Amino acid sequence: EAGVAQSPRYKIIEKRQSVAFWCNPISGHATLYWYQQILGQGPKLLIQFQNNGVVDDSQLPKDRFSAERLKGVDSTLKIQPAKLEDSAVYLCASSLMSAVGSPLHFGNGTRLTVT
Amino acid sequence: QQQVKQSPQSLIVQKGGISIINCAYENTAFDYFPWYQQFPGKGPALLIAIRPDVSEKKEGRFTISFNKSAKQFSLHIMDSQPGDSATYFCAASRSGANNLFFGTGTRLTVIP
């Protein structure tokens, strides 16, 4: 079973620039998550999709962050404009179902550095 | 506000020893408590999980102990090995949702 694929692996941008991350979940997984992991902290949920609908985006800074999951498969997360505090690893995860206990499978993340 | 509090921040254990990581939560709506293991440059991977209807779950060298009344749970790694050196995160999710609230992580180093 192929894992969750994310690209790029690393990205360095200047503040106020825009950036986009891409995620391809495990085939057949209906639920997709974007987490932000700041250095030395645990991952924090940004947004959760069920198929192509948003389940939870309460922690997403909507003035600068946006995400979409077209056709219920791949997803992109965009930041525009970026701030210094956005420097973090952005993790994509997927699960077979949205039910509690359905294991989350994480990708290896995109490390973003904002200078 | 940190929904799940984790300690210690770092832990050094001799090979063959027992590693113990503790977590506490306040939200009584949480009803699923997984532990994730993360190696440098990798995403977290599910290690073991427990529901509050049992007090202990064991899988190989890994055991979760759960105290519902104290709202605490812990991970015990028996016979710790250098390959166990990683960052461990406890997490919790509430009924009806599968979004996880993670602790701040414990960096475990097992010395040969």
Image (spheres, grey):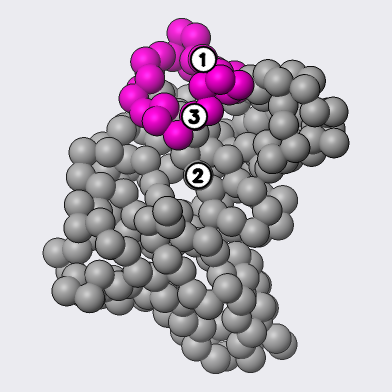
Spot occupied by residue A69 in the image (x, y as percentages of width and height): 49, 15
Which residue: 46% across, 8% down? A71
Spot occupied by residue B16 in the image (x, y as percentages of width and height): 57, 90
Q: Quickly name the residue at label 2.
A: A44
Q: Are marks 1 and 2 on the same chain?
A: yes
Q: Chain of mark 2?
A: A
Rendered position, A23 above or below B49: above
- Can the viewer see residue A62 in this picture? yes
Spot occupied by residue A81 in the image (x, y as percentages of width and height): 71, 20
Give me the C-alpha separation between circle 3 and circle 2.
10 Å
Helix, strand or loop under label 3:
loop
- Can the viewer see residue A3 in this picture? no
Q: Which range of residues does the magenta coloring cover?
A: A50-77
Q: Quickly name the residue at label 3.
A: A60
Helix, strand or loop under label 1:
strand
Q: Which amino acid, mark 1?
A: Glu
Q: Nearer the viewer, residue A63 or B92?
A: A63
